[in-house]
Amino acid sequence: MIKDILKKENLSKEDLLTLIQIKNPEDLKLLFDEAYKLKLKYIGNKVYYRGLIECSNICIKNCKYCGIRKDNKNVDRFSLSQDEILEISQWVYENGFGSLALQSGERNDKEFVDFIEDTLIKIQNKCSNSLGITLSLGEQTLETYKRWRNAGASRYLLRIETTNRELFKKIHFDDKLHSFDKRLQALKDLRTTGYQVGTGVMIGLPGQTYEDLVNDIIFFKENDIDMIGMGPYIIHEETPLGKEALGKILSDEERLTLSLKMIALCRLYLKDINIAATTALHALHPFGREKGILAGANVIMPNATSKNIKPKYQLYRGKPNLDDDALKGKLALEKSLKEIGEEVVYFKKGDSPHFFNRIK
Ligand code: 5AD
Ligand code: SF4
């Protein structure tokens, strides 16, 4: 019985496998409600924002699923100037988001590394070091992680994408630039450098099994991860994987439900971590993020990038609210969160409680 499994304090791999395969709506509701109860216990009826700044869509990598991969010649490449990033950061700060996230395609040339370091210092100078800054800038050297940490970033998101090595190889190129072992090492290096470490996976990839996803959750626990950002795989038809997956993957609705189940299971299994209700959920459903919160997530990353830039940063098709400015998005989201009984916390960083519990 699902009810009996949900009463357990510690779930086994078999329990996770049973729960992730729930089909009937009553059992699904039991799962989400139990996960939401835990979210209330560990975090309260609170949601933390990270203002997302998409800094550049230039990328040296060729991940087969991603719309801004290096070989996609149809992308209008851009990089925000430092002044533009500072201006958006100021907006995020003044609007009380408490945290911001810098995301971009991967680059590791000296100019880029220096630029990010200098920008971080300037952002923190402008807001008296009070912002929680998350970086999502791909695999870097230990030295680079250290420099960026010293310059003012405290969290780093680097998705493992899938913990199934064979599937990882299939969705990337099997070469030095796209190496599973390097990704694992990068997660270790981030940990050593003292970041709150976040990772995550794509859900509903072609060929991915329920057991793969359960193994992903177990991986998060074994690696003592502080934050999780994961979401449904969404086809971008200008990519090799997108072409191959067209018509062959689970429906949008099924991938949405599977992603919500993953959020709920992570909350049940990892308890005190931060879990993001990601934009990809929003891309599959207008209230995808709110559904994510009700399944146990506690973080949302509203896009703070200006609306003339947003369309250039398309990892997948169907990116939501491309025509909206950041303020409009913020107000609408706050209203819909209020309707589900959740309160946005302003002027607080919203660090992962797990991070402080593990370093005690
Ligand atoms: N669908 C869903 N997520 C994607 N990402 C990249 N391409 C896609 C896609 N087509 C995610 C990856 C990456 C993050 C920045 O965006 O998980 O780590
Ligand atoms: Fe580059 Fe990230 Fe896209 Fe891979 S997923 S191609 S690293 S932006």
Image (cartoon, rainbow, N blue to C red):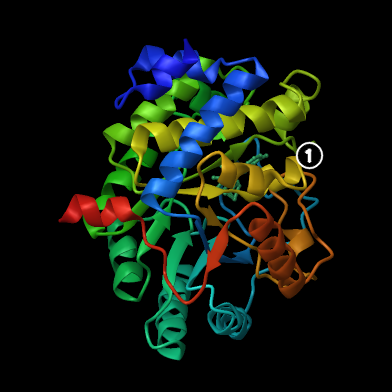
Q: Which one is nearer the viewer's eye here, 199 or 113?
A: 199
Q: Position of residue 342 (x, y in %)?
A: 57, 57
Q: Position of residue 250 (x, y in %)?
A: 72, 21
Q: Residue furthest left?
A: 360
Q: Which one is nearer the viewer's eye here, 115 or 266?
A: 266
Vertical order, 230 against 172 (above or below): below
Q: Residue at x 56, y 52 (%)?
A: 60
Q: Residues within 10 Å of mark 1 (few under 14, many from 20)?
A: many
Q: Which one is nearer the viewer's eye here, 79 or 335?
A: 335
Residue 203 shows up from this direction: no
Numbered label tally: 1
Which kind of residue does numbered mark 1 sit on? Glu
Q: Residue at x 69, y 68 (%)?
A: 330
Vertical order, 143 against 42 (above or below): below
Identify residue for label 1.
238
Q: Position of residue 280 (x, y in %)?
A: 67, 45
Residue 149: name its quadrant. bottom left
Residue 84 shows up from this direction: yes
Q: In the visual, does 308 lie left or right of 299?
A: right
Q: Residue at x 26, y 51 (%)?
A: 191
Q: In the visual, does 21 lie left or right of 197?
A: right
Can you say which quadrant of the picture contains the C terminus? bottom left
Badge 1 element: loop
Label 1 within 8 A of ligand 1 by Cβ: no
Q: Position of residue 311 (x, y in %)?
A: 78, 60
